[in-house]
Image (spheres, helix red, strand yellow):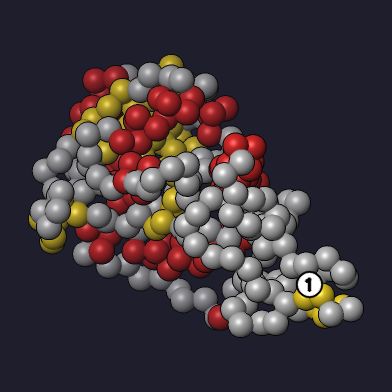
Amino acid sequence: QRGGPSTGLPTKTEQSDLLQAMFGRNGESPVPILAPASPADCFAIAIEAARLAVRAMSPVFILSDGFIANSAEPWAIPDADEIEPILVNHPSPHLHNGTNGTNGDAPFLPYQRDPVSLARPWATPGIVGLEHRLGGLSKAPETGNVSYAPVHNETMNRERAEKVARLADVIAPAEVYGAQAGKLLVLSWGGTYGAVRVAAAMAHKAGKAVGHLHLRHLNPFPRNLGEILKRYDTVFIPEMNMGQLALLIRGKFGIDVAQYNRLHTRPLKISEIKAEIDKLV
């Protein structure tokens, strides 16, 4: 993400694409969204994004920003053998009594979803017995046949949304640094991590009931986020945009938030975040 819109300021930083990633498609088509906190985190989050993409059979957005892209950080590259494999269970072709299918006499069902993840099978192109329709027209559940039936459109839209929502079952719960409840929770995402963490730590060390929660998962949110937000009198969200995460938090959890929004295309400073915290606590 860089200063924008359009070509904008291509060498400068901003956090202005969250809503585009969240809603920038026609129709109801949610996708998972992740945001790294640092250059080293980009390595780990890319692996996690691939894992989530396979689990949900969905594209995944990784929202980095210009500050992270122009930063440097040492980290230990793990041995590839120590990284948990990302397993793909491709359906196997099966020929039975002259009928192509994977489950006995029945034909291959390209939208027969996994009961846990709701992902549909990843059929390898060109395999006999796995032929099915592709394209942008609305489809029926299980068969994937083109369908204009209202109930089919309702079912498919809800299944697509639910498979993304269920990723919250496998992502890490949110963790708070500093005060676990109290006057103020500072909620951040993306490349603002360092400045916000230090500012919140300074306030906490000074005896103020301030906690800091940095989000890496923006869709879906961690399962425990709503419970954490309830522990604090005020939730404060500093962003390098006009309040995009604040808008999502209000809409999802029905709470008001304090905002600090800067579009100077420069990283947020510890001093300015600390000054805003001092105004609120």
Q: Quadrant of the C terminus?
A: top left
Occupied quadrant, residue 251: top left
Image x and y of residue 145, in percent: 63, 57
Occupied quadrant, residue 46: bottom left
User: Residue at coordinates 35% horizontally, 54% vertically from top-left?
Assistant: 63
Closer to the camera in the image, 94 or 209: 94
Occupied quadrant, residue 42: bottom left
Q: Is residue 93 visible?
A: yes
- Position of 93 relative to 109 (above/below): below
In the picture, measured across the screen, residue 58 lies left or right of residue 118, that is left
Q: Quadrant of the N terminus?
A: bottom left
- Number of marks drawn: 1
Closer to the camera in the image, 145 or 272: 145
Image x and y of residue 187, in percent: 39, 35
User: Residue at coordinates 38% horizontally, 19% vertically from top-left?
Assistant: 256
Task: Identify the residue position indicated by label 1 in the image.
Answer: 101
In the picture, measured across the screen, residue 132 lies left or right of residue 108, that is left
